[in-house]
Image (tube, helix red, strand yellow):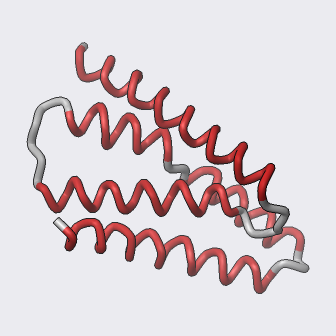
């Protein structure tokens, strides 16, 4: 029961952080590139890399921080919906390709860097 509570609290915190980052990005940038999703996924991947690098086995870390906060912060479903919108628009094929590559390669690189730094 404690694990579920930690995931719920962490998920709420992560979702609020994502909402704040999205709000800032919408107000600061006007671009077809979905910068907010890119930023939250890179931050989340880097942070998970750090946690993996530290090999933290504290009982509350995974449910609260990884599954909860980082799960609420990062967003695969939003990425998927953004990619579907781009491919459906048919005018955004270069953006679709570059965004796909940047998301997957960028998140992998961020996780690897976080892992190697610690």
Quarter of the rendering occupied by the N terminus: top left
Residue 18: % across, % down: 58, 42
For the point 40% across and 23% down, the residue is: 8
For the point 33% across and 67% down, the residue is: 111
Quarter of the rendering occupied by the C terminus: bottom left
| Left or right: 98 as drawn, with respect to 64 | right
Determine whether 36 is above or below 92 in the image.
Answer: above
Residue 4: % across, % down: 31, 21
Residue 74: % across, % down: 50, 49
For the point 22% across and 67% down, the residue is: 115
Residue 57: % across, % down: 9, 43
Residue at the far bottom in the pictured view:
94
For the point 19% across and 58% down, the residue is: 52
Determine whether 104 is above or below 58 in the image.
Answer: below
| Left or right: 45 as drawn, with respect to 74 | left
Question: Toward the viewer: 43 or 28?
Answer: 28
Q: Quadrant of residue 68?
A: top left
Q: Quadrant of residue 32?
A: bottom right
């Amino acid at each position: 029961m404690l694990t579920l509570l930690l995931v719920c609290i962490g998920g709420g915190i992560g979702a609020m952080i994502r909402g704040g980052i999205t709000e800032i990005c919408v107000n600061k940038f006007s671009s077809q590139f979905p910068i907010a999703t890119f930023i939250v996924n890179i931050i989340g991947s880097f942070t998970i890399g750090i946690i993996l690098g530290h090999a933290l086995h504290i009982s509350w870390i995974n449910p609260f921080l990884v599954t909860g906060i980082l799960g609420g912060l990062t967003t695969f479903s939003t990425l998927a919906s953004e990619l579907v919108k781009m491919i459906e628009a048919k005018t955004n094929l270069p953006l679709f390709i570059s965004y796909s590559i940047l998301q997957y390669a960028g998140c992998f690189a961020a996780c690897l860097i976080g892992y190697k730094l610690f």
